[in-house]
Image (tube, rainbow, N blue to C red):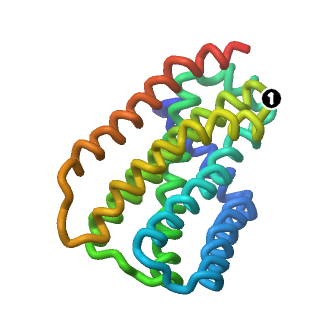
Amino acid sequence: MKKKHPVIALIQKDLLLEIRQQSTFYGILLYVASTIFVLYLAMGSPEEKVWNGLFWMIQLFICVNAVAKSFLQESRGRMLYFYSVAGARDFIISKLVFNLALMLLMSLVSMILFQLLLGNPITNPLFFIGFVCLGGGSLSLVFTFLAAIAARAQQHAALMAILGFPLIIPQIMLLMRISNIAFSDVVQGGLWQMVGLLAALDILVIALAIILFPFLWKD
């Protein structure tokens, strides 16, 4: 029987944990739905820029809740086991891929709920779906890397907040600016340059995670 690649085996492990511990997954879904419902009660159908800004701020907090737990649930005993069966790069790549898929799902669910409850001012839905996938993936990559650093430093929540928000604010501003295009009939100049910049930032985060995490792994 052919042996599975460690990355695939680790992703399957995370998926099985999510299936067995459904309360965690449903807890995130409840957080998403209740937050958006409160916004609906408070604001009704906001204008386009407010709608867009609220959407990305909600994605930020969803990402913090969804991604941080992936390292919080890994005890010291589990980490020692992973150290014996997989390498540092395989481990961090599996976390990046799994959290990316989870955040894409949460982003699409929150987009649907936003449209159902807060109205649908989007003019170019295909553009916006693409920006949601790109933005959700970008947020998950950054916070997965930060959660890995915080988990190894034994200061999960505090270190994630200290490191994360100064790094993520420029990214959120860029995502808001890019996604504003989906609310207009005219495609603004410089769109693909901004998308390329965001993609380059994602590649940089992935490279830093693969290069730097092995040094934390040894501690």
| Residue 141 versus residue 79 in the image, above or below | below
- Quadrant housing residue 18: bottom right
Residue type pointed to by label 1: Gln
Return the residue nearer the eye: 95 or 114: 114
Instruction: Say left or right for 49 vs 187.
Output: right
Query: What is the quadrant of the C terminus in the image?
Result: top right
Residue 78's place in the image compared with 18, above or below, is above
Residue 169 percent across, percent down from the top left? 53, 45
Residue bearing the label numbered 1: 154
Image x and y of residue 197, in percent: 32, 38
Q: Where 60 falls versus 53 (above or below)? A: above
Q: Residue at x 66, y 72 (%)?
A: 35
Evaluate whether residue 9 shows in this view. no
Residue at left 46%, top 44%? 171
Residue 127: x percent and y percent?
28, 63
- Direction from residue 58 to residue 72 in the image, left or right: right
Residue at horizontal 18 percent and vertical 67 percent from the top: 186
- Looking at the image, residue 168 sits to the left or right of residue 207; the answer is right
Q: Secondary structure at mark 1?
A: loop
- Is any atom of residue 141 visible in this view? yes
Judge by depth and name the residue closer to the eye, 12 or 131. 131
Q: Establish if 204 lies above or below 188.
A: above
98 or 131, nearer to the observer: 131
The quadrant where residue 178 appears: bottom left
Q: Residues within 10 Å of mark 1 (few under 14, many from 20)?
A: few
Question: How many numbered discs sit on the rendered protein?
Answer: 1
The residue under the point 28% across, 63% down is: 181
